[in-house]
Amino acid sequence: MIAARATAAPVLRRAGIAWLGLLLAALLLLPWFRDAALLDGPGASALAHGLAGRVWLLPPIAIALVLAAMAARGGDFRRHPAAGPLVVAALGWIVAQGFAIGLRGPSLPGLETLFPAAAAGQPGFGWGGFLAAIALVGLVAEVAAARGFCRGDRFASLCVTMIVALLATFVFFPIIKLGLTAFIAPDGSFALAQFGERLSAPALWRLDCLTGGGRCGVVINTLVLGILAATLSTLLGLALALLVARADFRFKQTLRAISILPIITPPFVVGVAIIVLFGRTGVLTQFGAELLDVRPTRWVYGLPGILMAQVLAFSPITFLVLLSTLEAINPTLEEASKTLGARPLTTFRTVTWPLLRPGLAAAFLIAFIESLADFGNPIVLGGGYEVLSTRIYFAVVGARYDLGNAATMAMVLLSLTLVAFWLQMRWLGRRSYVTVTGKSDNGLAAPLPGFVKVLAVAIAIPWVLFTVGVYAIVAAGGFVADIGRFDLTPTFRHLVTAFNFEIGAGGLQLYGSAWNSMITTLWVSAIAAPLTTLVGILTAWLVARQDFAGKRAFEFGTMLSFAIPGTVVGVSYVAAFNVPPIDITGTMAILVICFVFRNMPVGMRAGMAALAQIDRSMEEASQTIGAGGATTLRKVVLPLVRPAIFTALVYSFVTAMTAVSAVIFLVSARHNMATAYIMGRVENGEFALAIAYSAVLMLVMIVCVAAIQMMVGERRLGRRREARGQPAYAPAE
């Protein structure tokens, strides 16, 4: 062990020097600003600008040269007492310089000499500026590791530092910039009294619906909907996961496919299908009215309709989270209970159920937060039932444009999420849920008790029938003339309108109106999904396995982006990234970044639920024989959390394909997304065209999810029988 540490010391020093070399290259060689038309010469570096009289660029260069001189003397410059303050000072100086250039040009004295034609545009950082910031963040991680941060693990320190920097840039900064508007009056002055009036408005908190005197406030409506949707989604996901993981029947793979199917459904389409089925002139409504001789009503518009749509939409996520938790339970524990004479129901109640607590808590929290942030279902099925997400949306895009009121409601929504997070922590407590250890595993998972199996089947069958009905409408709606008016004349007109193409002498020519949005959506999703999974699993590993100062705040920061409604995220991104130093509005980059940090918490919670059941002893054994943090993560941890990786990849990819609430603010004519296209068709009343596009989009996602399953594979614990038809659990006696 001592020899391993001695060998690692030069490697660590070389790593610190590599970051220092990148910093020097960014400052001395690479173009500092992006818009070369506003500079004296294209590609000018920070050093060139500094020598030309822009002295505010010289301090970071001087600090970099001092650090280089410290490294040239030999020894580990990261341990020098002045290294930390110098690196932090250089990073702070660059950040301050970036924010000194606002919407109307440079705001620091003397910067106007750099940009004499500010009206022509405002330059953002070029490759030099961005790489210098990245190098300084890497140096902060190296210095912190050298002083014992993350127990001296350089890889863990780098991951924590980089994720914190990314969260600060793409989560905290946009939300803080938007949140400040809650305290600002329309004339730009500070208005604390007006904030109090917005926060205490009766429209948010009234309880008239409980006393029979009217409607409840928006916050109460949102809370009721969130609790109901999370509870029903978790129960349904648990029933499906138990049947898929612990029951043996012929159509298991079909049930698994149906369980995942709703997650690949674009927004608005399920709402349209529910209206076609249960609306006042819906198929089932008319059939029930004739059979029971009752008058059709508009009951589907409001809480019942939104709840049905949300349970249908969120159950796949709870199913995937709980399935990965069930697959991570060590079968030896259940087999030991059976050996001691416990009945199957007793084993389930005393062994299996307590070990499911992390998965249940994670599934409920995810479904609850998703319900709070949902926009597509309430906008279609809400009727007079207002929730915070739609109220915020109309506050931003409505005729009144009350951004301060939208920011206030976003803070209320964040508070609800924090309360849910705290309750989850209290419910889990400090108990241990470790089941996967380094010991040999020769157990077989216990079968489902008869009572639990019957209950799970009773819950799953109505949901399966309802899902089949909804997707029958989706499948047929795109290939008839007008499903909304029950004109069922078969036609391919809508499909041709969306995806028309020709193959001629000039090659493949795409003429359909939907091709641009489809191609952009595939590119954005394919880039965002692996990045989301990487950041999410890394974050889960850091929170579950590393001890460092500020870990609780770190975990909170990773969940913050998931707690904010997509409408608020979209508006905050436009406000934050439409001006220097990071002016990326209208590009594909802002779409990818939005999805990465919006969906990262799902991979994080799934990873934490899986890691909670894996004993640290295997990782400690890897580190004892000299493996570093990165090697241990790659060779030990990742193979054991494959279910969580699959969950993160599927969720992040499909969400990027189907998200709407944030992207409607971020799309552009060049980079349009599928959901924005579908929303435009729904607004124009072209339901059949929207359903046709959605059907094609669902087929594409099914193929992609199958490819993800093949790439990730599955983890096997215990005596998993390879022969087809043999269950991976012990037969019931």
Image (cartoon, rainbow, N blue to C red):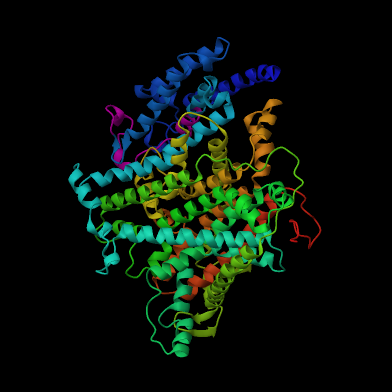
In this rendering, position of residue 511 left or right of residue 326: left
Q: Residue furthest top?
A: 73
Specify start and end residues of the magenta stretch as a single range: 107-135
Which quarter of the rendering shows the C terminus?
bottom right
Q: Position of residue 160 (x, y in %)?
A: 51, 33
Q: Is residue 438 above or below residue 63?
A: below
Q: Is residue 266 above or below residue 602?
A: below
In this rendering, position of residue 715 left or right of residue 484: right
Question: Picture quarter containing residue 664?
Answer: bottom left
Q: Position of residue 201 (x, y in %)?
A: 22, 55
Q: Is residue 91 above or below residue 721?
A: above
The residue lying toward the viewer, choosing from 672 and 293, is 293
Q: Verify whether residue 278 appears in magenta.
A: no
Q: Position of residue 117 (x, y in %)?
A: 30, 37
In this rendering, position of residue 629 left or right of residue 374: right
Q: Position of residue 223 (x, y in %)?
A: 37, 57
Q: Residue at x 45, y 73 (%)?
A: 272
- The number of numbered discs placed on residues in the rendered structure image is 0
